[in-house]
Amino acid sequence: MNEPTRRSDTTWMTDTTRMTGSQAMPTTASSAAMPPVPTRLGLGTVGFSLEQAESAHRLLDTFVGLGGTLIDTAARYGFGESERVLGQWLRSSGARDSVTLLTKGAHPDPSWASRLDAVSITRDLEESLERLGVDQIDVFLVHRDDESLPVEPIVDSLQAQVASGRTRSIGVSNWSTQRLGRAMAYAASTGGAPIASSSAYLGLAAPSRPVHHGCVDACDEASLAWYAANDVSLLAWSSQSSGYFEPDWDAASAAPAHVAAYDTPGNQARRLRAQQVAAEIGATANQVAIAWVLAQACRPVALGGFRDERGLRDAWAATTLELSVERCHWLETGELIE
């Protein structure tokens, strides 16, 4: 197998202008400075809470200090606490212009009834802006899909958010590539803001079932080929497979949903191969898993949450590690490419 090399992000950075809004329709806030180009590792904030705000702020400081820019949050996270903690940090740090803010809204209600209507989308985004203490979001995604609904009214509602200036760009989270393709085609036909981003699970541990209700993954060859062929940024949530490749991961103490989704014989073999590659190249198995995500032809952004600054620094080091096609194939299958 070819040895890994260190990557330069220069080429990838030219492919992410849509996600940051530089090709979006003009907005009422168009005179504001454009957000920085997202780095290949984005910081997830699902675990942020007001009770532990200080540790969250230290993690944010570390992320920005490393050069990180993309911060991923959602109205659903902690029922708004994640956004409030992030808003506190934005005010105290003065870092708003140094980061790209991504938030998600219109998550189904507690009974899983759909909220992909214009009123809910607008209200959720307005409330996110208030909690974050900002005038505009850089990337806004609808948080789940309802395939019983037509895509056109959903796209219209999202495009209205760009036209209003509440967000620079729009996208979806946990949508199938079929639905996403229809939404993108309709958005293009209107001449309005494009569907620029899509967030789906992507990790070296291929899930045997959705990790959470309504979640969608892009781990199969067809999905990865679709993303590689289409002009949309793939934001890979849980790119570390909920810690499955960490040395202390244990089925007895892990969340049952994670065990059911990830701890299959096939993924157990992938975990062992990641540990072998890590030993060969002087890395960690978790770094190898992140590098596998970043090595995909569709050039995804790896999103991840971190327990502490040490875990964040470990993951950040993986962004410069480039795995060959042959090594990625071996990690997936245990087979060598002739």
Image: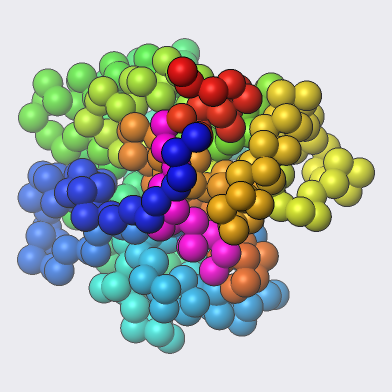
- Label the magenta part by its dominant secondary structure: helix
Q: Is residue 167 left or right of residue 205?
A: left
Residue 9 versus residue 217 in the image, above or below: below
- Residue at 26% over, 23% down: 229
Which x, y percent locates residue 276? Answer: 67, 43
**Residue that sits furthest to the bottom in the current view:** 92
Q: Is residue 252 left or right of residue 134?
A: right
Q: Residue 110: give x, y in percent of width and height.
A: 66, 37
Q: Specify whether residue 284 is in view.
A: yes
The residue depicted at 58 percent of the width and 21 percent of the height is 335
Residue 324 lies in magenta, yes or no?
yes
Task: Let me know if residue 112 appears in the view.
Answer: no
263 in the magenta segment: no
Q: Examine the rendered structure and indicate whether residue 119 appears above or below residue 101.
A: above
User: In the rendering, at what x and y percent does residue 286 appear?
Assistant: 62, 51
Which residue is pictured at 86% across the width and 41% down the height? 251
Q: Is residue 219 left or right of residue 322?
A: right
